[in-house]
Image (cartoon, rainbow, N blue to C red):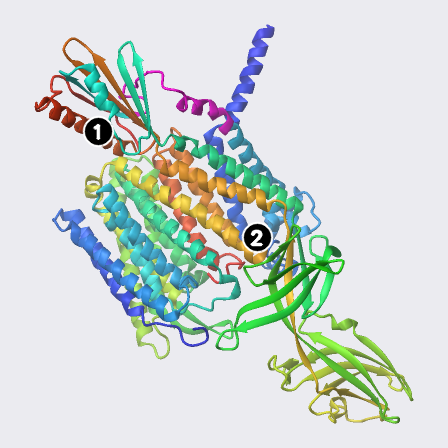
Amino acid sequence: MNGSSPFTGDLIFYYASTFLFIASAALYGINFFFKKKINLAGRLAAFAGFLVQSAGMALRWAETGQPIFISLYEMLLWFAWGAVLIMLIAELKFEYKDLGFFVLPFVIIIMGIVLLMPVKGSGAVVPALQSVWLYIHVAVAIISYAAFLVGFAAAIMYFIKKNIKQSWFAFWVSVFTAVVLLLINRGELITGRSLNIYLRSDGVPRLAAAFKDVGLILFFAFIFFVISSFIHFIISIKNRKPQFKKGIDGIGRLSFAAGVLGLLAGLAVMIFRLMTHDFLKITSQPAILAFLLSALIISAFCLLVISRFKEFQERLPEDDLLDNLQYYSVKIGFPFLTLTIITGAFWANKAWGSYWGNDPKEWAAAVTWLVYAAYLHMRMTRGWSGIKAAIILVVGFAAVIFTLLGVTYLAPSGLHSYI
Amino acid sequence: MNSVKERQKKNRKKSLLDFLSSIPLAIILLIVIGLLAFTGTLIPQADIFSADELAAYNEAHPAISLLNRVVSSFQIADRDPWRSSIYGIYHSWWFVIAILLLALNLTVCSVRRLALLKHYFKRFDGTVSSGAGGSSGAGFSGRYELGKDELVKLVRKWNLKGFHSREEKETPEGTAFRFQRGRIGRLGYLVVHLGILMVIIGAMLSSLTREKGFVWLREGEETDRYYSRTADAELPLGFSIKAGRLRRVMYGDGKSVKDWYSDLVVSRNGSEILRKTIQVNDPLRFEGRSFYQASWNYGYSFTLKVVDKKTVESSDFPLSAGNDLINIEGVEKTYSTSNGRVFFRLQAFYPDFIITEEGFATRSQELNNPAAVLLVYWEGLKEAQRKVVFSKLPEMDFARMHQKTVAIEEPFKFVLDRKIATLDVTGMEISSDRGTDVVYIGFYLVIAGMFLTFYFNHSRVWVLIAPARGYCDVRFSGSAHRNKQMFDKELAKLFIGFEKQIEEITGRKNPGSVKKKNIKGKNKQ
């Protein structure tokens, strides 16, 4: 496998599964809002997507003849696969039919990143990876991360149900989106008002193209999100006169909506520019596209939530069920995260001679473990359970994403250089 | 006066204990340790990065450099200065203290909660929990026109799923039953906490006793010493280790390594003790030390001849060289010719010699164009001269080609023998760590404890059969540690099943309709 071109025969399956997940999310949405009796249609579509994805991954495993746990690409495939599986199990267990509406947007983001990745390879199974521990370590990690994703979605549902001010949602998502836009090309997108495309040659990034129009659109989106976060912050904290609040609330929402539209337009123009470019391809800038896609899906979903907040509240199940759902996800995720760390330690001891190497990825997993341990203890403590515990669950999921993706890109490299 | 003071003292002691064993303290410590550890993932740490890399990073990031200066000022000095800085968070005293506090917190908490735990393991004294309120979920009761003995027999025959423990006691009120399931789950948190404590103790033990070293062995080479990284010195092993056959297996592309194998023999005083082929992920262990397949290098052994041009006498110098592992700086030889002495030093050996922009290099590891680079000095020359000796082109004098004027004809020449053997060299990481076993026991305990905690839900069902004139009152109540809603449903099912059984006996529908109640508390989980 190594050295020759990577196997891509399974790619068509992932396009199909992503399409099915999008369709499923739409069906879940229709069911959620209009209470049409099509609830099983969404679930069936998600299950079909799950089967198609499984088939693609089985094909990949068979064709490459090596464990498909090696690259980030393969890890993300498993992540989406596991999240759908656990979501379906939780829906059956809790006899609750709308969970998919809240979980699938995140699955779609993961699949979007998968499809955008330029290198769809698997990499060589270097000697250190040739161990039965590879299978155990990665398998338990996938179950844990997938369960935490479902728990994260449940925490968001819990916030809505528990009547957290909509302005707080709008504030946090605005800040998140503005920061994402600010991070692109290390701030260059905003300061230069141009989306510069860099390609690496000989390890040095070189400017390949500058999309001024995309940069300008995204710059305006950024401004709108900054205005939106500012206004929503004021609304959230100050008990001003209701009239004043009403006045600026409209402006806040408008700017939020304008920001989402700007993101959509920027992304669309960027994709168009990439596709029509002489030598650039749609997969030339996976990181930026992934950032924009995540920001767009999350902010659009948030726009939907804040504009139809009451309906969301009415249609969400009782908070006890949502609390149980969060606990259920941690009940699966936490023991499996523990197993991930422990099997990793066993493996490291076999391969490198010590069970713990102070590697950034090891500590990132440990941080995640500590956060979820804090959640479990908060849940038993009066005054700390409920909203506060749910906030910790969101922090925990951020730690999961950091462990899976962030360490590889933000932290200095360590032992986990392969993934 | 005295007693007040004493009481105050006692109270203070108690409140300190309360604080130390409190869950909020645990939560705060978990979050604080998490934040510190998170910082360590963002800033490169001395455990992974070299001093040069850290210095470069420190220079490139002025904000972190400033922060580092603040942090370092109240840090305890370490042998490695980078470890006593922000680049050594995991070794800092405040990080260790936070972890020790957590250990203290969970120890005190676990011990104090033992008393609570005892309550669940007491024998059944006939007390029937009311069902409503407390920690329990639901309760049901019914009145049946049946004799007490009949009802007791019925309950005794029950075969409840998972409820392996059935206790029965006669009380003044009537006959009381208690069914239990998953009581062992109550011990889960204790086992987890004990496990975490073992992991912390083991980790401390590791940091005190861990020793790391390295040894390079050529095929056939034997050593009883190794380089200790911890002590930064060469130390004796206490036995000797010999490398037998070394093998390297490549992937089909011929570039990436699939695996390395080293046959090792451990012996002491000449007698063999142990023999094992190690590979990555499969080390050799002996007397507390483990030998891990960590690196590999390719070396060469060859013979350099120095020929006296006048007398045509020659002398052989067997030499060996590898990429970067065998210290060739030390290989310095002297040869006396008929015209003064020659000193030479082997600088490098290239199996597939090539000249690039950056200087000499090798194209591959194959012996396509072997060349030795020497630094030569003899008494007739003013300064040392670099010579490249090719085994395939013995007449080529590289130094002459690149010199415009050749002053003196040298009275000697170098010849690189055509017989060159490749030499694989295995690099092994050696480690010994007395904490590992303790940590592993901790790991097993944590796994076992979590299994108990999450998958054993202590549930209890009480049944009280109270006889009266002509009828019996039967009261059902239950309590579950977790997942109370599910348990409520289970209890309701149990009650319905019970009524069905009575229906079959009496032949009457709704046998308990005389009095029936359903108490349902609002519960979590």
Q: Which residue is mark 2?
A: A357
Bounds of the magenta segment: B110-136
Q: Write down the residue under mark 1.
A: B494
Q: Nearer the viewer, residue B362 or A278?
A: B362
Tell me if B193 is positioned left or right of B59 in this view: left
The local secondary structure at tag 1 comes to helix
Q: Name the residue furthest top.
A: B1
Q: Nearer the viewer, residue B94 or B459?
A: B459
B2 versus A317 height, above or below:
above
Residue A165 visible at all: no
Three-letter amino acid code at the position of disc 1: Leu
Q: Inspect the magenta stretch and tell me whether residue A156 lies in it.
A: no
- As helix, strand or loop, the secondary structure at mark 2 comes to loop
Give neighbour class at mark 1: few <14, some 14-19, many 20+ (Cα, 10 Å).
some
> What residue is rendered at 8% in x and 22% in y?
B508
Disc ID at residue A168: none
The quadrant the C terminus of chain B occupies is top left
Q: Looking at the image, is B466 positioned above or below residue B402? A: above
Magenta-span inclusion, residue B129: yes
Residue at left offset 59%, top offset 46%: B436
Q: Horizontal and vertical percent for residue B361?
A: 64, 80
Tell me, yes or no, whether the two marked residues, 1 and 2, touch with CB atoms within 8 Å: no
Residue at mark 1 to residue at mark 2: CA–CA distance:
53 Å
Q: Left or right: B439 with respect to B431?
A: left
Residue A178, can we see it?
yes
Amino acid type, residue under disc 2 in the picture: Gly
Which of the image's four quarters has the N terminus of chain B? top right
Residue A326 picture quarter? top left
